[in-house]
Image (spheres, rainbow, N blue to C red):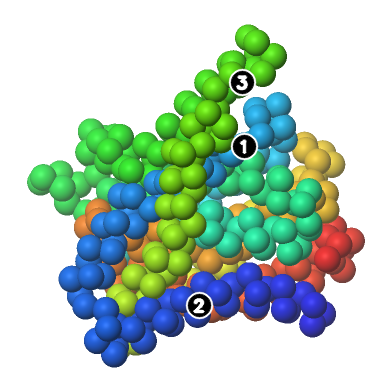
């Protein structure tokens, strides 16, 4: 049991500690408001897009994809997305907060802590499954997040018009980078199909560009967490308590119950889910809300303070819920840690 608890701690505490460091640096005056504002823009427009592009491009190939588990994850993500709308609407009447709560219900921190968590729970085979699932679901996270954040906030006198939502999706840097990653992956696959091997890849012939993008990917997570910590305010908790509780419960309790619970019930009947797949499901449905959710909320007119609070509290409390999920799956013989 202690091993499981330490696994959860090691997966989530690095996130919490970097947020805490950012908070302390801001409180001490080392980080200014202007730096945090510009840091947000850098993370959203440059660092995170580079990370997402590399994650998608690094897929081994379409032939390595377990389409059953991928399809299940996409369907369950859409189900949670649909249910999350009602949670957001029933919780608050403030438009800027509704989209943030809705985003929190379905958008997990798969891109940052998901792979390390899956690896700690299931080894290299589990990481391979999680990497493929994240490459397709993380771009979907971003598309759904744009929809959620656009639905309630007025933009140009219109609130969530189809045209505005499509424009926001089309110009979102994270979605653009994921699309470019899929295009480059498709080109690599086409070369292999035509000539038996890829004659040009970023990793070999374009290594200078791949290395530069990979370096930007490496700083994306820690820098985003530092900036996030600089925005955190304990004084805001009281005024946002209902929204924080709703978003946190949905993210780390309701979502994993639906995503992992349905997999347990349906596995064997509609698709296969075993010891290599459950770690990926825990990483996707059980991890805290994505760090980029706060950055995106601020850039799209959502309540950035609420989004920041949700990242912090879901990260802290997910240590215990992940521990519980792992214990239950182990007792059922579905996970071998």
Q: Quadrant of residue 30?
A: bottom left
Residue 278 in percent (x, y) is at 75, 54
Separation of marks 3 and 2 at Cα, in angstroms: 41 Å
Residue 56 horizontal side relative to residue 224, left or right: right
Separation of marks 3 and 1 at Cα, in angstroms: 14 Å
Farthest top residue in view: 194
Residue drawn where x is 27% and y is 79% of the image: 31
Task: Check disc 3 and report the residue beneath it.
Answer: 198
Q: Residues within 10 Å of mark 1 (few under 14, many from 20)?
A: many
Query: Which of these two is toward me, 73 or 17?
Result: 17
Q: Of the residues tagged 3 and 1, which is closer to the observer?
A: 3
Which quadrant would the N terminus be assigned to in this image? bottom right
Query: Which of these two is toward me, 335 or 241?
Result: 335
The reply to whether discs 3 and 2 touch (Cβ–Cβ < 8 Å) is no
Q: Which mark is residue 59?
A: 1
Residue drawn where x is 29% and y is 90% of the image: 28
Residue 185 in percent (x, y) is at 54, 28
């Amino acid at each position: 049991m202690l091993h499981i608890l330490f696994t959860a701690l090691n997966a989530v505490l690095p996130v919490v500690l970097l947020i805490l460091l950012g908070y302390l640096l801001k409180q001490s005056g080392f980080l200014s408001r202007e730096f945090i504002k510009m840091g947000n823009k850098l993370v959203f427009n440059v660092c995170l897009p580079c990370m997402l592009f590399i994650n998608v491009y690094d897929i081994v190939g379409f032939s390595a994809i377990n389409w059953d588990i991928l399809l299940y994850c996409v369907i369950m993500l859409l189900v949670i997305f649909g249910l999350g709308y009602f949670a957001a609407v029933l919780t608050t009447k403030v438009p800027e907060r509704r989209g943030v709560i809705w985003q929190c219900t379905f958008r997990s921190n798969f891109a940052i802590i998901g792979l390390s968590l899956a690896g700690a729970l299931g080894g290299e085979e589990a990481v391979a499954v999680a990497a493929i699932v994240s490459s397709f679901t993380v771009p979907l996270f971003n598309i759904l997040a744009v929809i959620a954040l656009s639905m309630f906030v007025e933009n140009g006198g219109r609130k969530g018009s189809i045209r505005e939502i499509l424009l926001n999706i089309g110009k979102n840097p994270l979605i653009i980078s994921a699309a470019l990653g899929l295009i480059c992956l498709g080109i690599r696959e086409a070369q292999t199909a035509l000539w038996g091997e890829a004659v040009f890849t970023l990793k070999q012939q374009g290594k200078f560009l791949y290395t530069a993008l990979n370096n930007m990917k490496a700083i994306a997570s820690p820098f985003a967490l530092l900036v996030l910590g600089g925005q955190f305010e304990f004084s805001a908790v009281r005024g946002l308590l209902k929204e924080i509780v709703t978003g946190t419960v949905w993210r780390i309790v309701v979502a994993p119950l639906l995503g992992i619970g349905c997999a347990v019930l349906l596995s064997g009947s509609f698709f296969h889910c075993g010891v290599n797949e459950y770690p990926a499901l825990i990483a996707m449905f059980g991890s805290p809300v994505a760090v980029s959710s706060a950055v995106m909320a601020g850039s799209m007119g959502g309540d950035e303070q609420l989004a920041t609070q949700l990242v912090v509290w879901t990260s802290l409390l997910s240590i215990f819920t992940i521990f519980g999920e792992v214990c239950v799956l182990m007792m059922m013989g579905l996970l071998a840690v």
